[in-house]
């Protein structure tokens, strides 16, 4: 959607109402979005009766689909206040009883993180919200917030979960390596399938190296099936990592 149209909708509806309505629209239309076919490939790999991590849950679009997995628990992580408001409205709207929300950022150290919601041409770009960090030079002008920063490997809710963590969806705008670096013990123990959006930059290749060290293979979805990622053949941004 062009920025001018977004600006008009934000003004007419109010930003919080816009986010909720936009999330509803995306939830109902996601299967028709050709760019999201790999997400539905990922969904098919998640067994019933397990736990799933939705890291960068944003406004609940993919959470609503993950929560449909039978007898599952979806642990969601989202630190941005406006996103959290829309997320909670989505959870209530769909009566998602199996969703647990943590209003925190994640990394490989604990403490406090500064987040930014970029503002471009007077339009708040909630989908590009990210941790302010020296490794992320893009989209740093906007609304800033301080939030708690936690490490997945140290979270008692996950350590003591009565369900195996079978899957991780992560989209945190170029901070993926730091989050996953803080989840190495969790991944070694549970061997989850991981679905990650990774831009073509240093963060991507650090993630590749991390998964390689954990004995994972990198796949992409091509023509409704998973194939091993070949950088000379595939121009991709979404990846599925499977334990070898």
Image (spheres, rainbow, N blue to C red):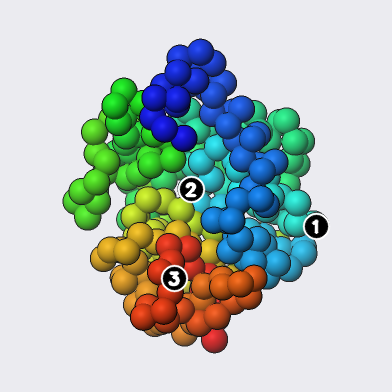
**Which mark, by number, is residue 80?**
none
Question: Mark 3 or mark 1: which comes first in sequence?
Answer: 1
For image coordinates 70% across by 67% down, the residue present is 44
Q: Which residue is farthest top?
A: 12
- Residue denoted by label 2: 56
Q: Relative to residue 163, is residue 242 drawn left or right?
A: left
Gap between marks 2 and 3 measured at Cα = 18 Å
Q: Is residue 200 visible?
A: yes
- Residue denoted by label 1: 70
Q: Relative to residue 26, is residue 47 drawn left or right?
A: right
Gap between marks 3 and 1 measured at Cα = 27 Å
Task: Name the spot of residue 169 as percent of width and height, x first.
Answer: 54, 58
**Which mark, by number, is residue 184?**
3
Q: Nearer the viewer, residue 6 or 94?
A: 6
SS for callout 1: loop
Q: Is residue 189 above or below residue 146?
A: below
For image coordinates 24% across by 33% down, the residue present is 141
**Residue 100 falls in image quadrant:** top right
Between marks 2 and 3 in the image, the one whose residue lies nearer the viewer? 2
Q: Nearer the viewer, residue 5 or 108?
A: 5
**Residue 18 falls in image quadrant:** top right
Question: Mark 1 or mark 2: which comes first in sequence?
Answer: 2
Task: Name the spot of residue 209 as percent of width and height, x first.
Answer: 34, 77
SS for callout 2: loop
For image coordinates 37% across by 74% down, the residue present is 208
Q: Is residue 239 above or below residue 53?
A: below
Position of the C terminus, as image quadrant, is bottom right
Gap between marks 1 and 2 measured at Cα = 22 Å
Q: Nearer the viewer, residue 28 or 179?
A: 28
Task: Name the spot of residue 240 as percent of width and height, x first.
Answer: 53, 70
Question: Mark 2 or mark 3: which comes first in sequence?
Answer: 2
Q: Is residue 182 visible?
A: no
């Amino acid at each position: 959607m062009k920025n001018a149209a977004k600006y008009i909708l934000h003004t007419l509806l109010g930003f919080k109402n816009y986010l909720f309505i936009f999330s509803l629209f995306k939830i109902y239309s996601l299967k028709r979005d050709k760019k999201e076919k790999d997400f539905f490939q990922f969904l098919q790999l998640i067994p019933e009766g397990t736990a799933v991590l939705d890291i960068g849950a944003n406004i609940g679009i993919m959470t609503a689909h993950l929560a449909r997995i039978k007898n599952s628990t979806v642990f969601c992580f989202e630190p941005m206040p406006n996103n959290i408001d829309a997320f909670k409205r989505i959870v209530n709207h769909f009566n998602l009883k199996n969703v647990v929300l943590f209003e925190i950022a994640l990394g490989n150290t604990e403490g406090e993180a500064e987040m930014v919601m970029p503002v471009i041409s007077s339009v708040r770009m909630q989908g590009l919200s990210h941790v302010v960090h020296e490794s992320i030079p893009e989209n740093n002008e906007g609304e800033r917030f301080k939030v708690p920063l936690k490490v997945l490997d140290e979270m008692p809710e996950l350590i003591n979960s009565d369900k195996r963590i079978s899957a991780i969806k992560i989209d945190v705008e170029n901070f993926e390596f730091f989050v996953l670096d803080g989840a190495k013990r969790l991944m070694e123990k549970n061997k989850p399938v991981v679905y990650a959006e990774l831009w073509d930059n240093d963060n991507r290749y650090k993630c590749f190296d991390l998964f390689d060290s954990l004995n994972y293979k990198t796949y992409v979805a091509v023509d409704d099936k998973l194939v091993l990622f070949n950088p000379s053949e595939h121009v991709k941004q979404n990846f599925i990592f499977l334990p070898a």
